[in-house]
């Protein structure tokens, strides 16, 4: 089967949708190809919680947050450890920070995308400065609504007649002619039929490599030591790097594939939709993070919300690269969450009363869902019984009761001394987090682990979970893919995760969170305008 078009966009996530939208607005004929089914238009963003990073928005000013592009960029470059030699990643970082408010925040507002009332404060930084102020703006309705609204805008575009969408199409090869990329080839997976597309330009927006665990391991970051035996998949099932290979064969430069954004608190999904399907928990700040023996990981205790890259490094340095979180029902009801739209139905469906109820009384639905179904969670009324169930889960006696008891007792004793004597670093960071209203609403105030009134006790076995690629095809500020000499590959563009969200790695080795969805929209719009 043969097709002819002006521009072919490979990948129908939000980067590809944004690119196609801009192309239609300029009167270009567009063929949008995606390997997934039509109902999954919007890609991985549709499953996300929908947080986007901005610096200097009206929403921030409403809460007295004094932010600016200059402060945002300083945090970004420091946290990502981007140096002067990282030319294109740094250039994309500068461009995004400077332009994200008018070109993403305002643009989404014009498309009737709303944000929740208060920005959240994540990736605050640990050993290096992170977000100096709250910048994580959550789409009202999560990433599900974001993807649906962008899809509706695309499919309802006044120039919709210029758009052809084809699903179940796997692109394997880029076609070159007279020194330029002039189309692509692949297979219709349902029938096995070959197809070929001739086009003036190709935009790759097909995601990263983090859905392929072999590639994840092959590009494991040096900070994390050896890759774990078990890595769960929290990425898109078709994020396999196939288009990176095709572009590389056409002369493209692929950079920084070890700059990955993985999480330390993954559990197995009990309704898997792909091999190794994992869920990324938002770990409770008030839980104790223990190693495979039940010892508290330290000497700096692990607390989420400060440096995700470091959390992964600390877990991977253990003899067994998985961990436990020890908590109780009271902590779980207030703090335990799962990243993404699927397990946040109140936010996804924009049910204000249910959200208020969960904040006030605890998210009982999620607690019951997780404890009833997730194989990596055990519950017990007493600590000896809990440790026994932890060992039953791993199939040996590796979890030591004395270690777990010592960790919990020491922590509770420190709380018992009173706030003036909370010199435990975890308690200090909890206190700091609670100064911001958004965190205070869902963080306990110095809650003891062994408190009998807060039981039953809960232990969660957590694995590293693969999520996003922060490196990829190197692009200039017009989303043109560059070759190894830094020259544009004629006819070839890339956007979103395929381009490391811009420049082959605009975040550096750490992301400030929310730069992923924002980078997809920002880079997709640029690719569409230029192509």
Image (spheres, grey):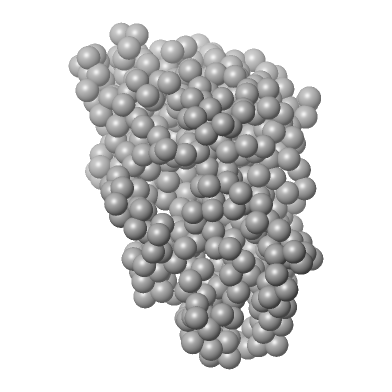
Q: Is residue 404 above or below residue 425?
A: below
In the rendered image, which quarter contains the C terminus? top left
Residue 164 percent across, percent down from the top left:
25, 24
Where residue 528 appears, x then y in whole percent?
42, 17
Q: Quadrant of the N terminus?
A: top left
**In the picture, residue 155 is in which quadrant?**
top left
Whole-percent x and y of residue 97?
A: 60, 24
Q: Is residue 289 above or below residue 483?
A: below
Q: Position of residue 68 (x, y in %)?
A: 63, 24
Residue occupying image coordinates x 57% and y 87%: 383
Above/below status of 81 relative to 213: above
Is residue 278 rendered to the left or right of residue 290?
Answer: left
| Viewer-side residue, 381 vs 525 | 381
Q: Residue at x 45, y 25 (%)?
A: 105
Residue 183 seen in the figure: no
Task: Answer yes or no: is residue 224 visible.
Answer: yes
Please state the total of marks drawn on the protein image.
Answer: 0
Residue 461 or 174: which is nearer the viewer? 461
Residue at the image position 25 percent from the left and 42 percent from the top? 39
Residue 507, above or below 338: above
Which residue is at a point 62% across and 66% down the rendered structure image? 446
């Amino acid at each position: 089967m043969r097709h002819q078009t002006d521009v072919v966009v490979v990948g129908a996530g939000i980067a590809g949708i944004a690119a196609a939208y801009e192309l239609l607005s300029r009167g270009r004929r567009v063929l949008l190809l995606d390997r997934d089914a039509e109902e999954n238009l919007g890609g991985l963003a549709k499953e996300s919680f929908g947080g986007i990073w901005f610096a200097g928005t009206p929403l921030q000013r409403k809460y007295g947050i004094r932010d600016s592009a200059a402060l945002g960029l300083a945090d970004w470059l420091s946290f990502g450890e981007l140096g002067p030699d990282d030319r294109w990643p740094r250039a994309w970082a500068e461009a995004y920070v400077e332009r994200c408010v008018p070109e993403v925040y305002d643009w989404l507002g014009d498309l009737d995308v709303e944000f929740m009332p208060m920005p959240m404060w994540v990736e605050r930084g640990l050993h290096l400065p992170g977000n100096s102020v709250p910048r994580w703006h959550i789409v009202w309705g999560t990433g599900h609504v974001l993807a649906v609204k962008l899809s509706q805008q695309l499919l309802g575009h006044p120039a919709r007649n210029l758009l052809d969408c084809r699903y179940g199409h796997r692109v394997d090869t880029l076609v070159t002619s007279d020194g330029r990329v002039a189309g692509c080839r692949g297979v219709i997976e349902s029938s096995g039929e070959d197809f070929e597309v001739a086009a003036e330009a190709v935009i790759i927006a097909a995601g990263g490599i983090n859905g392929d665990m072999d590639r994840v391991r092959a590009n494991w970051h040096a900070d994390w030591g050896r890759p774990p035996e078990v890595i769960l998949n929290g990425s898109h099932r078709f994020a396999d790097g196939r288009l990176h290979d095709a572009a590389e064969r056409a002369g493209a430069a692929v950079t920084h594939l070890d700059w990955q954004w993985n999480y330390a608190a993954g559990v197995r999904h009990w309704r898997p939709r792909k091999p190794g399907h994992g869920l990324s928990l938002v770990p409770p700040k008030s839980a104790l993070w223990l190693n495979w023996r039940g010892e508290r990981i330290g000497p700096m205790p692990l607390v989420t919300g400060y440096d995700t890259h470091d959390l992964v490094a600390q877990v991977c340095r253990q003899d067994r690269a998985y961990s436990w979180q020890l908590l109780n029902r009271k902590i779980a009801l207030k703090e335990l969450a799962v990243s993404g739209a699927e397990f946040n139905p109140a936010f996804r469906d924009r049910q204000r009363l249910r959200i208020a109820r969960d904040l006030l009384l605890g998210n009982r639905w999620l607690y019951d869902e997780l404890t009833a179904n997730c194989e990596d969670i055990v519950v017990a009324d007493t600590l000896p019984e809990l440790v026994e169930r932890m060992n039953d889960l791993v199939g040996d006696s590796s979890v030591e009761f004395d270690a777990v008891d010592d960790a919990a007792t020491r922590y509770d004793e420190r709380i018992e001394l009173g706030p003036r004597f909370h010199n435990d670093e975890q308690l200090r960071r909890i206190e700091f987090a609670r100064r911001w209203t958004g965190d205070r609403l869902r963080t306990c105030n110095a809650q003891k682990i062994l408190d009998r009134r807060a039981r039953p006790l809960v232990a969660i076995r957590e694995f590293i979970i693969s999520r996003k690629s922060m490196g990829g095809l190197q692009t200039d500020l017009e989303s043109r893919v560059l070759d190894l000499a830094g020259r544009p590959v004629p006819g070839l563009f890339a956007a979103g995760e395929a381009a490391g969200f811009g420049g082959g790695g605009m975040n550096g080795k750490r992301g400030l969170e929310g730069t992923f969805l924002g980078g997809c929209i920002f880079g997709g719009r640029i690719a569409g305008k230029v192509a």
